[in-house]
Amino acid sequence: MAAVPVDTFTGLALDMNSRVPYPMYAMSGPVGSTNSTILSDIHLGGAIMWIGGDALMLLACIPSRSRG
C-alpha cells in the first residue's frame, strides 16, 4: 500500500507535463519522432502508471476467499 501514492504522483506528474521532461527522451525516441509524439508517449505512460498501478494495488487489497 505504501507504493500507491508514489505511483499515483509519478503517473500524474508524467501525464501533466507540457514539455518533454529530459532531453535524452527526445534523443532516444524512434527515428522521425517529434517532440509532440514523444510527449504523447510520455502522457500515455503516465496514465498507464497512474490508473494501471492503482488498479493492480486495489486488486491486491481484495482478500481472497479460501474454499474449504
Image (cartoon, rainbow, N blue to C red):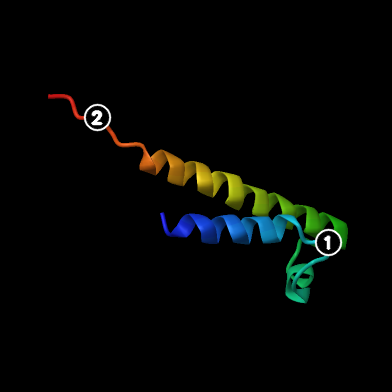
Which residue does the image show at 79% across and 68% down from the upper left? 26
Quarter of the rendering containing residue 9: bottom right
At 67% from the left edge and 56% from the top edge, which residue is drawn? 12
Answer above or below: position of 14 versus 22.
above
Residue type at tag 1: Ser
Looking at the image, which residue is at 61% across and 61% down? 10
The reply to whether residue 34 is in sight is no
What element does badge 1 sit on? loop
Q: Is residue 66 left or right of residue 16?
A: left
Q: At 63% from the left edge and 56% from the top edge, which residue is drawn?
A: 11
> Relative to 4, is 43 on the left or the right?
right
Q: Is residue 65 or residue 31 the one in the foreground?
A: 65
Residue at mark 1: 18
Residue furthest to the top in view is 68
Mark pair 2, 1: CA separation: 45 Å
- State the quadrant of the N terminus: bottom left
Residue at the limit of the structure toward the left, as seen here: 68
- Chain-order first, disc 2 or disc 1: 1
Q: Residues within 10 Å of mark 1 (few under 14, many from 20)?
A: few
Residue at numbered disc 2: 65
Q: Position of residue 40 (x, y in %)?
A: 79, 53
> Which is more toward the observer, 13 or 28?
13
Percent coordinates x, y for residue 50 in the rendering = 60, 50
Amino acid, disc 2: Arg
Q: Is residue 22 above or below residue 18?
A: below
How packed is label 2: few (under 14 Cα within 10 Å), some, or many (20 or more)?
A: few
Using the rendered view, name the quadrant where residue 38 is placed: bottom right
Side of 45 relative to 3 (left or right)? right
Tag shown at residue 40: none
